[in-house]
Image: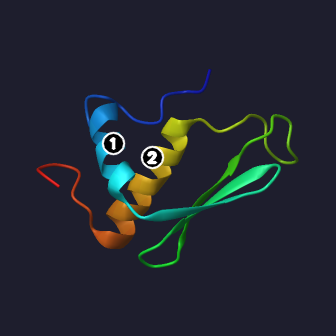
Amino acid sequence: MAEPVWDDRLISRERALQLAGRWPVHFDVTRIHVYVRCLRCGQSCGRFVTTPGAPNDSRPTDVEEILAAVLRHAVTAHDLALSGTG
């Protein structure tokens, strides 16, 4: 099992899903990787593994890691506030 991506005391999984679920992203899926790209600015939010044992990767990615990457991009590139409404 993967290490937790974030501390629930800082942001709940429900709040993370709410914010990331509203953020416009595009997924390019290959046999080994999923590439996530922001539809607001075109920048990459991350590259994730879909196949165990893929070259240079040790394990598949879970949904929490993708949510965290989308939120990290939204906060750092677009100044999304994690607190409050929205």
What is the three-letter code of the residue carrying label 1? Ala
Q: Secondary structure at mark 2?
A: helix
User: Measured along the vertical axis of the image, is residue 50 above or below residue 33?
Assistant: above
Tell me if I can see residue 12 in this picture.
no
Q: Residue furthest top?
A: 1
Q: Quadrant of the N terminus?
A: top right
Quarter holding residue 12: top left
Residue shown at 12%/51% (left/top)? 85
In the rendering, at what x and y percent does residue 34 appear?
68, 53
Quadrant (top left/top right/bottom left/bottom right) for the C terminus = bottom left
Percent position of residue 63, x then y: 53, 38
Q: Quadrant of residue 26?
A: bottom right
Q: Is residue 14 visible?
A: yes
Circles 2 and 1: CB atoms closer than 8 Å: yes
- Judging depth in this view, the residue of 57 and 43 nearest the camera is 43
From the image, tell me which residue sits under label 1. Answer: 16
Q: As drawn, which residue projects farthest toward the bottom? A: 41
Residue 42 in the image: state x and y as whole percent. 52, 77
- Which residue was labeled with disc 2? 68
Using residue 73 as the reference point, say whether residue 78 is left or right of it: left
Distance from the alpha carbon under mark 2 to that under mark 1: 8 Å
Tell me residue 18's x, y (percent). Answer: 30, 44
Badge 2 or badge 1: first in the primary sequence: 1
Please state if 35 lies on the left or on the right of 26 as rendered.
right
Q: Is residue 79 above or below residue 34?
A: below
Q: Amino acid at mark 2?
A: Ala
